[in-house]
Amino acid sequence: MLLSILDHNLERVGFLDNEDNAKGLVFYNDMWSRYLETGSATFDFTVDKKNLDLDTHNRRVYQTLNERSFVSFHDNGRAYLFNIMKTVEDEDAITCYCENLNLELLNEYANPYKADQAYSFEEYCKKLDLLDFAALKLGINEVSDQKRTIEWTGQDTKLKRLISLANNFDAEIAFETYLNDDSSLKVFRLNVFKEHDDKHQGVGVRRDDIILNYDQNIEKITRTVDKTPIFNMIHPTGSDKTITRQVTKTRTVYKTVTVSGGGAGNTENALRNIGSRKGQRVGTGQCYSLSALYSALLGGPGLGAGVTGISGRIGAGIAASNIGTDYRWGAFGWAVVGNEVSNAKAGAIVNIRANYGSPFWTGPYGHTAIIKSVSGSTITVLEQNYAGRMYVVENSYNLGAYMAGVQTVCFPPEIAAGKTVGGQAVTKQVPVQEKYTENVKETVKTVIPSNKYKEYKNDAGEVEFYVKDGSIFAPISAKLYPSVLSGKEIDDNWIRKDASIETTDENVLEANALKMLRAGCYPTITYDVKGDADLEPGDTVKVHDDQFYPVLLLEMRASEVHRSFSDPDQGHSVFTNFKVLENQLPSDLLSRMEEMADAKAPYTIRLSSDNGTAFKNNEGETLFKADLYKGEKLVATDVSWRWALDGVVTVGMQYLVKARDIDDTAVLTVSGYVGNTEVATTEITLANLVEQIELKVMTSNGNTFKNGVIASTLTATLWRGGKEIDKDGTEFSYIWTKTRDDETPDEHWNADHSYSQKSIRITQEDVFRRATFSCEIEYIGKQV
């Protein structure tokens, strides 16, 4: 085999030969390797440094083999030109490593690029300068009628960019070299073929003229099955893209409304009711009781105080000064405002600050009253427990001085709406919530829509791939190659791969991700065939070997071809894309037997939960999900579920269990249905361990006093498992009772304290000589 040595101008300066009697340099340890995936080739060889007749005084022939030189040869009527990329030299020999591509393709980088519209393969080559600067000409182009919109966000060598471009067009590429008679370059051509599939050959040809047989034209076949890189779920992410979406927002605008005078009929009736009670005791005689009655008459929160129950409380509910903030007034249509003089309106509740001087002289709990009328600088109120008079009285005060001591004002619904008690028409600005839409631009990653579901079936009608939740799954692969051992140990047997794909087209993203999943969801099987089969990359041939069981008869495609001119025994080819051509009957029979076995397999239910099956102290919840299996196959079509917790039946795809719904233990029964037929049932026991509650009464100032001076606050604290519960007093009711020193109950005191209080204040008015205070609790649920 004769090879030409070319200098940097592609002019012949010497020869290489592999014959022992050659007059030129003799090459050996050579290997010519060609690769389908990249369309490229390498050629490595070694020569001895020896003197030749062609040497001159100034230069030895072997010195022409340097990093600026080229090597060319012809084989089977085709020309090949190699660029010497690397040399390794010692005293005796030079080894050269060559590639068939130029430095422009190998080393120069193409920049990021985003197409503004769909372009053809050739148009992209021009826009990215992939051909002209690399001295390439476009030859065969089987995808010339196609256009794509593509984006590259990073830099690549021009060779990688060409391969990426071909992948985006579902194509394969190959390089061809044409030389002149003097071995100089005539043309360097790029051919583009439609990707190999059942309809297209791609690179190479179908070689029906030969069959590779063991012990005839091949020496050995090595089969490698490798599941190391396997994955059966892919989550692809594309490039950034800018989207515009309409967002509905809400804003507050103010509109002018005129409210006719008067109109507060319910408020006027309630004021008359309170006014009719002058001289009478309401509830416990405390000021709190009068406001509690007034609130109840107008549908407000329940303030207790021996008049009503408790509702809407969010604070302690003890001090009259805090009535405006201790209850959720807004939930009942009321409004709470500040102490501005303009807020002094007939029908409002006024809550006086604690420890305030004239004209109130309040104590630590403040005071509360109801405004009857406002006239000029005079305010008239209805109040109780003023100056020790524990009955309803009517008093008038200076408006400015009175409002200075007010902490909050509570407006009944009619007053809050602008109506008045016997007043004139009122014009006011009121806030109104208005909806509007706004276009918002966002930069987002290109992804498969999360609501998209699509199935891809194989020739047997089985779902081999499906798209769901923005990912693509390979269920057959997951069953054959689960993520953990046998696949029975856990429910999640998906092996996930995250992939970044340079595209802003969702369809292209899905197609490329599916292609990657197809290539990676099953073990990689390659056949290395030893022997000189005279093949080109991409050629499809039949291979036969009766030394395997069962006998191999495959149709395979050459992905790598390695050849040595000096030692043909070193030649071998690597094959992929194999297809079994015989032994189909036993395979079909086995499949049929498996189908019969599956038909007899029972249905089973596998349950999973996100928080276990045991709770403590009525706290927590857990969400149950169920999967239906027939044998080892997941059944996902036309499946429904019925859940029964201690006889209470619910239908749904999942079931939420709350700890408070379980008394000690409970049995959850799960029944699976296919269509309307129950096919499987299972049970699981749930437990709720509730520890005993311990009640401790804490005193702020002890329990023994002298000289008739008594002041202490008793607080009921609840403990469970060493932890204090219900600190805010919203889950239990607390009823206090008093027993005198003669062991008889104090009925009057007990009646005044019949509403729930977590804490009570004890003074000398509550204890004569000795008294015992007890607290009983009852669980009422979380109150808001």
Image (cartoon, rainbow, N blue to C red):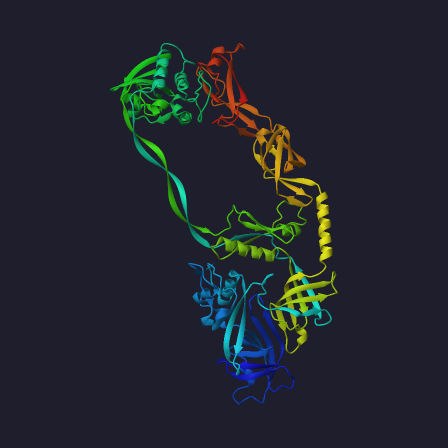
In the displayed structure image, the side of residue 391 where residue 466 appears, left or right? right
**On the image, which quarter does residue 332 sit in?**
top left
| Residue 763 point in image, percent of width and height | 44, 17
Residue at the extreme left: 376
Is 741 situated above or below 520?
A: above
- Image x and y of residue 92, in percent: 60, 81
Quadrant of the image occupied by residue 665: top right
Q: Position of residue 402 (x, y in %)?
A: 30, 21
Q: Judge left or right: residue 740 versus residue 370.
A: right
Quadrant occupied by the N terminus? bottom right
Q: Residue 220 versus residue 754: which sits nearer the camera?
A: 220
At horizontal 49% and vertical 54% (from top left) the residue drawn is 238
Name the foreground residue: 100 vs 316.
Answer: 100
Q: Nearer the viewer, residue 137 or 239?
A: 137
What residue sits 71% from the left and 63% below the top?
552
Judging depth in this view, the residue of 383 and 301 nearest the camera is 301
Q: Using the image, determine if residue 637 lies above or below residue 363.
A: below
